[in-house]
Amino acid sequence: MIKNLLKNKKQILALAPMDGYTDCAFREIVKKYGNPDLLFTEFVNAQGLIRATDKLVDILRYTEIQRPIAAQLFGREPEYFYQAALVVCKLGFDGIDINMGCPAKNIAGKGGGAALIREPELALDIIKAVKQAVADYRERLSDQNDLVDLIEKKKKEWNIKEDQSREITISIKTRTGYDEDITEEWIETLNKVKPDFISLHARTFKQAYKGEADWGAIKRAVKVSKVPIIGNGDVKSFADAQKMFKQTGCSGVMIGRGAVGKPSVFRVEEKVGFKSGDIEPAVIFNNSNVSAKGACLRRQGPCQEAGKPASGWKTQISEAGKIVLEHAKLYVEYKGEKRFYEMRKHLMSYFSGFEGAKKMRVKMSKVNGLKDVARCLS
Ligand SMILES: Cc1cc2nc3c(=O)[nH]c(=O)nc-3n(C[C@H](O)[C@H](O)[C@H](O)COP(=O)(O)O)c2cc1C
Protein backbone atom coordinates (compact mmCIF):
# COMPACT_ATOMS: atom_id res chain seq x y z
CA MET A 1 0.00 0.00 0.00
CA ILE A 2 2.74 2.46 0.91
CA LYS A 3 4.78 1.41 -2.11
CA ASN A 4 1.83 2.21 -4.38
CA LEU A 5 1.39 5.51 -2.63
CA LEU A 6 5.03 6.40 -3.21
CA LYS A 7 4.76 5.37 -6.84
CA ASN A 8 1.45 6.99 -7.67
CA LYS A 9 0.93 10.01 -5.48
CA LYS A 10 3.01 13.11 -6.04
CA GLN A 11 2.33 14.95 -2.83
CA ILE A 12 1.90 12.66 0.13
CA LEU A 13 0.62 14.03 3.43
CA ALA A 14 1.53 12.11 6.56
CA LEU A 15 0.81 12.31 10.25
CA ALA A 16 4.09 12.35 12.19
CA PRO A 17 4.74 9.84 14.95
CA MET A 18 4.39 11.57 18.34
CA ASP A 19 4.92 9.71 21.55
CA GLY A 20 2.07 10.36 23.96
CA TYR A 21 -0.13 11.80 21.18
CA THR A 22 -0.53 9.65 18.08
CA ASP A 23 -2.22 6.69 19.70
CA CYS A 24 -4.96 4.62 18.11
CA ALA A 25 -7.77 6.98 19.16
CA PHE A 26 -6.07 10.13 17.88
CA ARG A 27 -5.10 8.49 14.59
CA GLU A 28 -8.71 7.41 14.12
CA ILE A 29 -9.85 11.00 14.59
CA VAL A 30 -7.13 12.30 12.25
CA LYS A 31 -8.04 9.74 9.61
CA LYS A 32 -11.71 10.70 9.81
CA TYR A 33 -11.34 14.49 9.83
CA GLY A 34 -8.07 14.98 7.96
CA ASN A 35 -7.60 11.80 5.94
CA PRO A 36 -3.81 12.02 5.50
CA ASP A 37 -2.26 9.50 3.11
CA LEU A 38 -0.03 7.87 5.68
CA LEU A 39 -0.01 7.34 9.43
CA PHE A 40 2.71 6.33 11.87
CA THR A 41 2.34 4.88 15.34
CA GLU A 42 4.10 6.29 18.38
CA PHE A 43 7.53 4.76 18.73
CA VAL A 44 8.00 1.48 20.53
CA ASN A 45 11.16 0.01 21.99
CA ALA A 46 12.39 -2.82 19.74
CA GLN A 47 13.93 -4.73 22.63
CA GLY A 48 10.82 -4.28 24.77
CA LEU A 49 8.45 -5.41 22.04
CA ILE A 50 9.96 -8.84 21.79
CA ARG A 51 9.48 -9.40 25.51
CA ALA A 52 5.87 -9.89 24.50
CA THR A 53 4.06 -7.92 27.15
CA ASP A 54 0.49 -6.89 26.51
CA LYS A 55 1.27 -3.31 27.44
CA LEU A 56 4.04 -2.83 24.88
CA VAL A 57 2.24 -4.57 22.06
CA ASP A 58 -0.81 -2.41 22.81
CA ILE A 59 1.16 0.73 21.88
CA LEU A 60 0.89 -0.59 18.34
CA ARG A 61 -2.89 -0.99 18.35
CA TYR A 62 -4.45 0.19 15.09
CA THR A 63 -7.58 -0.34 13.03
CA GLU A 64 -8.12 -1.30 9.40
CA ILE A 65 -9.32 2.18 8.45
CA GLN A 66 -5.97 3.63 9.51
CA ARG A 67 -4.17 2.00 6.59
CA PRO A 68 -1.67 2.58 5.24
CA ILE A 69 0.10 2.68 8.58
CA ALA A 70 3.72 2.17 9.61
CA ALA A 71 4.89 1.12 13.06
CA GLN A 72 7.87 2.98 14.43
CA LEU A 73 10.65 1.22 16.33
CA PHE A 74 13.52 2.64 18.33
CA GLY A 75 16.61 1.08 19.84
CA ARG A 76 20.19 0.40 18.80
CA GLU A 77 20.76 -3.37 18.50
CA PRO A 78 20.21 -4.83 15.01
CA GLU A 79 19.22 -8.23 16.44
CA TYR A 80 16.40 -6.69 18.50
CA PHE A 81 15.26 -4.72 15.47
CA TYR A 82 15.18 -7.97 13.51
CA GLN A 83 12.95 -9.71 16.06
CA ALA A 84 10.74 -6.68 16.60
CA ALA A 85 10.32 -6.21 12.84
CA LEU A 86 9.07 -9.80 12.58
CA VAL A 87 6.41 -8.93 15.16
CA VAL A 88 5.42 -5.75 13.31
CA CYS A 89 5.10 -7.68 10.02
CA LYS A 90 3.03 -10.37 11.71
CA LEU A 91 0.76 -7.72 13.18
CA GLY A 92 -0.14 -6.75 9.63
CA PHE A 93 1.46 -3.31 9.37
CA ASP A 94 2.09 -1.73 5.98
CA GLY A 95 5.50 -0.39 6.94
CA ILE A 96 8.25 -0.31 9.53
CA ASP A 97 9.77 3.03 10.39
CA ILE A 98 13.10 3.26 12.18
CA ASN A 99 13.61 6.13 14.58
CA MET A 100 16.95 7.86 13.99
CA GLY A 101 15.84 11.27 15.13
CA CYS A 102 14.66 11.26 18.72
CA PRO A 103 16.73 13.65 20.85
CA ALA A 104 15.30 12.56 24.24
CA LYS A 105 17.84 11.64 26.91
CA ASN A 106 16.34 8.24 27.62
CA ILE A 107 16.68 7.32 23.94
CA ALA A 108 19.54 9.27 22.31
CA GLY A 109 21.41 9.10 25.64
CA LYS A 110 21.36 5.32 25.31
CA GLY A 111 22.66 5.41 21.75
CA GLY A 112 19.30 5.09 19.96
CA GLY A 113 17.22 7.70 18.08
CA ALA A 114 19.29 10.66 16.84
CA ALA A 115 22.49 9.21 18.35
CA LEU A 116 22.54 6.75 15.45
CA ILE A 117 23.47 9.63 13.14
CA ARG A 118 26.91 9.44 14.79
CA GLU A 119 27.18 5.72 14.11
CA PRO A 120 26.42 5.33 10.42
CA GLU A 121 27.65 1.73 10.19
CA LEU A 122 25.38 0.66 13.02
CA ALA A 123 22.50 2.62 11.48
CA LEU A 124 22.98 0.73 8.21
CA ASP A 125 23.16 -2.59 10.04
CA ILE A 126 19.84 -1.83 11.68
CA ILE A 127 18.21 -1.08 8.34
CA LYS A 128 19.66 -4.29 6.89
CA ALA A 129 18.34 -6.28 9.86
CA VAL A 130 14.85 -4.88 9.36
CA LYS A 131 15.04 -5.63 5.64
CA GLN A 132 16.02 -9.19 6.45
CA ALA A 133 13.08 -9.53 8.83
CA VAL A 134 10.67 -8.33 6.14
CA ALA A 135 12.13 -10.92 3.78
CA ASP A 136 11.95 -13.68 6.40
CA TYR A 137 8.77 -13.09 8.34
CA ARG A 138 6.46 -15.30 6.31
CA GLU A 139 8.52 -18.36 7.18
CA ARG A 140 10.13 -17.34 10.37
CA LEU A 141 8.74 -15.72 13.41
CA SER A 142 10.58 -16.06 16.62
CA ASP A 143 10.49 -19.45 18.25
CA GLN A 144 8.87 -17.88 21.29
CA ASN A 145 5.42 -19.41 21.30
CA ASP A 146 4.12 -16.93 23.86
CA LEU A 147 4.90 -14.11 21.44
CA VAL A 148 3.16 -15.83 18.55
CA ASP A 149 0.11 -16.48 20.73
CA LEU A 150 0.05 -12.87 21.87
CA ILE A 151 0.19 -11.58 18.28
CA GLU A 152 -2.71 -13.82 17.27
CA LYS A 153 -4.69 -12.68 20.30
CA LYS A 154 -4.08 -9.02 19.45
CA LYS A 155 -5.06 -9.45 15.84
CA LYS A 156 -8.40 -10.85 16.94
CA GLU A 157 -8.90 -8.22 19.63
CA TRP A 158 -8.06 -5.34 17.26
CA ASN A 159 -9.94 -6.94 14.38
CA ILE A 160 -7.07 -6.51 11.92
CA LYS A 161 -5.81 -8.62 9.08
CA GLU A 162 -2.34 -9.71 8.18
CA ASP A 163 -2.19 -9.95 4.40
CA GLN A 164 0.96 -11.84 3.52
CA SER A 165 0.98 -10.50 -0.02
CA ARG A 166 1.37 -6.97 1.33
CA GLU A 167 4.68 -5.34 0.45
CA ILE A 168 5.99 -3.90 3.69
CA THR A 169 8.05 -0.71 3.41
CA ILE A 170 11.11 0.18 5.46
CA SER A 171 11.64 3.83 6.19
CA ILE A 172 13.80 6.05 8.37
CA LYS A 173 12.80 9.10 10.36
CA THR A 174 15.78 11.26 11.07
CA ARG A 175 17.27 14.73 11.46
CA THR A 176 19.73 16.86 9.52
CA GLY A 177 22.66 15.94 11.73
CA TYR A 178 23.82 15.53 15.30
CA ASP A 179 25.84 18.59 16.37
CA GLU A 180 25.81 20.17 12.95
CA ASP A 181 23.96 19.92 9.67
CA ILE A 182 25.39 17.06 7.59
CA THR A 183 22.25 16.51 5.54
CA GLU A 184 23.81 15.52 2.22
CA GLU A 185 26.38 13.15 3.73
CA TRP A 186 23.83 11.50 6.02
CA ILE A 187 21.16 11.10 3.36
CA GLU A 188 23.72 9.62 0.97
CA THR A 189 24.78 7.18 3.69
CA LEU A 190 21.19 6.04 4.27
CA ASN A 191 20.67 5.71 0.52
CA LYS A 192 23.37 3.01 0.42
CA VAL A 193 20.88 0.45 1.74
CA LYS A 194 17.91 1.83 -0.21
CA PRO A 195 15.16 2.37 2.34
CA ASP A 196 11.76 2.95 0.70
CA PHE A 197 11.71 6.57 1.88
CA ILE A 198 13.25 8.90 4.44
CA SER A 199 11.36 11.39 6.60
CA LEU A 200 13.55 14.34 7.49
CA HIS A 201 12.83 16.61 10.44
CA ALA A 202 14.79 19.67 9.39
CA ARG A 203 16.65 20.24 12.64
CA THR A 204 19.78 18.72 14.14
CA PHE A 205 19.82 16.70 17.36
CA LYS A 206 21.45 19.70 19.06
CA GLN A 207 18.59 21.97 18.05
CA ALA A 208 16.04 19.55 19.47
CA TYR A 209 12.86 21.60 18.83
CA LYS A 210 14.46 25.05 19.05
CA GLY A 211 14.54 27.67 16.32
CA GLU A 212 12.94 27.28 12.94
CA ALA A 213 13.10 24.09 10.92
CA ASP A 214 15.49 24.57 8.00
CA TRP A 215 13.47 23.70 4.92
CA GLY A 216 16.58 24.44 2.84
CA ALA A 217 18.02 21.21 4.26
CA ILE A 218 14.99 19.31 2.94
CA LYS A 219 15.65 20.74 -0.51
CA ARG A 220 19.29 19.62 -0.28
CA ALA A 221 18.19 16.16 0.84
CA VAL A 222 15.82 15.87 -2.13
CA LYS A 223 18.69 16.75 -4.46
CA VAL A 224 21.02 13.99 -3.27
CA SER A 225 18.52 11.26 -2.41
CA LYS A 226 17.56 8.46 -4.74
CA VAL A 227 14.65 7.55 -2.47
CA PRO A 228 11.65 9.80 -1.74
CA ILE A 229 12.07 12.41 0.98
CA ILE A 230 9.21 13.36 3.28
CA GLY A 231 9.85 16.80 4.71
CA ASN A 232 8.98 17.62 8.30
CA GLY A 233 9.17 20.55 10.69
CA ASP A 234 6.96 23.51 11.52
CA VAL A 235 4.14 22.77 9.08
CA LYS A 236 1.08 24.15 10.82
CA SER A 237 -1.46 24.42 8.05
CA PHE A 238 -2.43 23.00 4.68
CA ALA A 239 -1.01 26.17 3.12
CA ASP A 240 2.33 25.60 4.91
CA ALA A 241 2.43 22.08 3.48
CA GLN A 242 1.96 23.47 -0.04
CA LYS A 243 4.81 25.90 0.64
CA MET A 244 7.07 23.07 1.73
CA PHE A 245 6.27 21.06 -1.42
CA LYS A 246 7.00 24.08 -3.57
CA GLN A 247 10.17 25.21 -1.81
CA THR A 248 11.81 21.81 -1.42
CA GLY A 249 10.45 19.49 -4.12
CA CYS A 250 9.87 16.82 -1.46
CA SER A 251 7.65 13.81 -2.17
CA GLY A 252 5.69 14.15 1.03
CA VAL A 253 5.05 16.44 3.97
CA MET A 254 4.71 15.15 7.49
CA ILE A 255 2.75 17.11 10.08
CA GLY A 256 3.08 16.57 13.82
CA ARG A 257 2.17 19.30 16.27
CA GLY A 258 0.06 21.00 13.62
CA ALA A 259 -2.44 18.15 13.74
CA VAL A 260 -3.03 18.28 17.49
CA GLY A 261 -6.34 20.03 18.09
CA LYS A 262 -6.66 20.39 14.32
CA PRO A 263 -6.99 16.97 12.70
CA SER A 264 -8.38 18.63 9.56
CA VAL A 265 -4.99 20.25 8.88
CA PHE A 266 -4.41 17.76 6.05
CA ARG A 267 -7.35 19.05 4.05
CA VAL A 268 -7.51 22.00 1.79
CA GLU A 269 -10.58 23.26 3.63
CA GLU A 270 -8.99 22.55 7.02
CA LYS A 271 -12.50 22.61 8.21
CA VAL A 272 -14.09 19.25 7.72
CA GLY A 273 -15.95 18.25 10.81
CA PHE A 274 -15.96 21.75 12.20
CA LYS A 275 -18.74 23.99 10.99
CA SER A 276 -17.64 26.61 13.32
CA GLY A 277 -19.42 29.87 12.87
CA ASP A 278 -17.72 32.63 11.01
CA ILE A 279 -14.11 32.54 12.05
CA GLU A 280 -11.29 30.71 10.39
CA PRO A 281 -10.93 27.15 11.63
CA ALA A 282 -7.17 27.59 11.51
CA VAL A 283 -7.70 30.21 14.16
CA ILE A 284 -10.10 28.18 16.23
CA PHE A 285 -8.01 25.11 16.24
CA ASN A 286 -4.83 26.96 16.83
CA ASN A 287 -2.31 24.25 17.37
CA SER A 288 0.95 25.68 18.58
CA ASN A 289 0.01 24.23 21.90
CA VAL A 290 1.96 21.01 21.86
CA SER A 291 5.41 21.08 23.29
CA ALA A 292 8.00 18.36 22.93
CA LYS A 293 7.53 17.63 26.60
CA GLY A 294 3.89 16.93 26.00
CA ALA A 295 2.77 20.03 27.77
CA CYS A 296 -0.16 21.96 26.44
CA LEU A 297 0.54 25.64 26.49
CA ARG A 298 -2.07 28.30 26.01
CA ARG A 299 -1.80 30.58 23.03
CA GLN A 300 -4.41 33.10 22.14
CA GLY A 301 -5.76 33.17 18.65
CA PRO A 302 -5.66 36.29 16.52
CA CYS A 303 -9.32 37.04 17.06
CA GLN A 304 -8.67 37.44 20.73
CA GLU A 305 -5.51 39.39 20.16
CA ALA A 306 -7.51 41.84 18.12
CA GLY A 307 -9.70 42.21 21.18
CA LYS A 308 -12.80 41.17 19.30
CA PRO A 309 -14.41 37.99 20.48
CA ALA A 310 -15.60 36.03 17.48
CA SER A 311 -19.29 35.70 17.05
CA GLY A 312 -20.88 32.29 17.13
CA TRP A 313 -18.58 31.09 19.88
CA LYS A 314 -21.25 28.93 21.43
CA THR A 315 -21.48 27.08 18.13
CA GLN A 316 -17.72 26.78 18.11
CA ILE A 317 -17.68 25.29 21.56
CA SER A 318 -20.42 22.90 20.68
CA GLU A 319 -18.71 21.84 17.43
CA ALA A 320 -15.38 21.39 19.19
CA GLY A 321 -17.33 19.55 21.88
CA LYS A 322 -18.56 16.97 19.39
CA ILE A 323 -15.11 15.98 18.32
CA VAL A 324 -13.85 16.12 21.88
CA LEU A 325 -16.51 13.64 22.94
CA GLU A 326 -15.85 11.41 19.96
CA HIS A 327 -12.11 11.43 20.66
CA ALA A 328 -12.63 10.75 24.36
CA LYS A 329 -14.98 7.83 23.62
CA LEU A 330 -12.46 6.27 21.25
CA TYR A 331 -9.74 6.63 23.86
CA VAL A 332 -11.86 4.76 26.38
CA GLU A 333 -12.77 2.10 23.83
CA TYR A 334 -9.11 1.40 23.06
CA LYS A 335 -7.41 2.03 26.39
CA GLY A 336 -10.05 2.08 29.11
CA GLU A 337 -10.64 4.90 31.54
CA LYS A 338 -7.91 4.21 34.07
CA ARG A 339 -5.34 6.65 32.70
CA PHE A 340 -7.84 9.12 31.30
CA TYR A 341 -5.68 12.03 32.49
CA GLU A 342 -3.53 11.28 29.41
CA MET A 343 -6.40 12.65 27.33
CA ARG A 344 -6.48 16.06 28.97
CA LYS A 345 -3.80 17.56 26.75
CA HIS A 346 -5.70 16.49 23.64
CA LEU A 347 -9.05 17.68 24.92
CA MET A 348 -7.62 21.06 25.88
CA SER A 349 -6.03 21.50 22.48
CA TYR A 350 -9.41 21.64 20.73
CA PHE A 351 -10.33 24.80 22.62
CA SER A 352 -8.23 27.72 21.60
CA GLY A 353 -8.57 31.12 20.03
CA PHE A 354 -12.25 31.85 20.61
CA GLU A 355 -14.30 33.32 23.38
CA GLY A 356 -14.96 30.83 26.12
CA ALA A 357 -12.05 28.64 25.03
CA LYS A 358 -9.94 29.33 28.09
CA LYS A 359 -12.77 28.35 30.43
CA MET A 360 -13.19 25.12 28.52
CA ARG A 361 -9.45 24.41 28.64
CA VAL A 362 -9.44 24.84 32.37
CA LYS A 363 -12.36 22.44 32.67
CA MET A 364 -10.72 19.91 30.35
CA SER A 365 -7.51 20.07 32.35
CA LYS A 366 -9.31 18.37 35.24
CA VAL A 367 -11.40 15.67 33.62
CA ASN A 368 -11.01 12.09 34.79
CA GLY A 369 -13.37 10.24 32.53
CA LEU A 370 -16.11 10.36 29.91
CA LYS A 371 -18.76 11.51 32.35
CA ASP A 372 -16.62 14.51 33.33
CA VAL A 373 -16.14 15.42 29.67
CA ALA A 374 -19.86 15.19 28.97
CA ARG A 375 -20.63 17.29 32.05
CA CYS A 376 -18.16 20.00 30.99
CA LEU A 377 -19.73 20.13 27.56
CA SER A 378 -23.32 20.25 28.72
C1 LIG B 1 5.26 15.32 21.92
C2 LIG B 1 6.10 14.85 20.77
C3 LIG B 1 6.38 13.49 20.67
C4 LIG B 1 7.16 13.02 19.59
N1 LIG B 1 7.38 11.67 19.46
C5 LIG B 1 8.05 11.20 18.37
C6 LIG B 1 8.17 9.79 18.12
O1 LIG B 1 7.64 8.94 18.86
N2 LIG B 1 8.88 9.41 17.03
C7 LIG B 1 9.45 10.31 16.16
O2 LIG B 1 10.08 9.92 15.18
N3 LIG B 1 9.32 11.64 16.36
C8 LIG B 1 8.63 12.09 17.42
N4 LIG B 1 8.43 13.44 17.57
C9 LIG B 1 8.90 14.36 16.52
C10 LIG B 1 7.79 14.61 15.48
O3 LIG B 1 7.48 13.44 14.77
C11 LIG B 1 8.20 15.71 14.48
O4 LIG B 1 9.38 15.30 13.85
C12 LIG B 1 8.44 17.04 15.14
O5 LIG B 1 7.41 17.35 16.06
C13 LIG B 1 8.54 18.17 14.10
O6 LIG B 1 7.38 18.22 13.32
P1 LIG B 1 6.17 19.29 13.58
O7 LIG B 1 6.81 20.65 13.57
O8 LIG B 1 5.22 19.06 12.47
O9 LIG B 1 5.62 18.96 14.92
C14 LIG B 1 7.68 13.93 18.64
C15 LIG B 1 7.40 15.29 18.76
C16 LIG B 1 6.61 15.76 19.81
C17 LIG B 1 6.31 17.22 19.89
Image: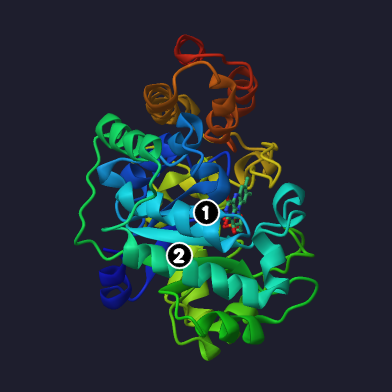
Q: Is residue 234 above or below residue 92?
A: below
Rounded to the nearest whole Å, what is the CA distance between mark 2 and mark 1? 10 Å
Residue 1 badge: none
Up the image or down, 319 lies above or below 192; here it is above
**Element under label 2?**
helix
Q: Which mark is residue 130?
A: 2
Residue visible at 72% across and 57% down in the picture? 108
Is residue 296 among what the camera can see? yes
Looking at this view, name the residue that lies furthest to the front: 143
Foreground: disc 2 or disc 1: 2
Residue 92, x across and y down, in percent: 29, 50
Q: Is residue 171 above or below residue 164?
A: below
* Horizontal side, residue 5 vs residue 74: left or right: left
Q: Secondary structure at mark 1?
A: strand
The quadrant where residue 349 appears: top right
Q: Residue at x 77, y 54 (%)?
A: 109
Q: Position of residue 316 (x, y in %)?
A: 45, 31
x, y percent for residue 372: 51, 11
Q: Which residue is mark 1?
A: 73
Q: How is the image coloured?
A: rainbow
Q: Are marks 2 and 1 in contact (CB under 8 Å)?
A: yes
- Amino acid type of disc 1? Leu
Q: Is residue 356 visible?
A: no
| Closest to the observer, 335 or 98 | 98
* Amino acid type of the residue tagged 2 in the rendering: Val
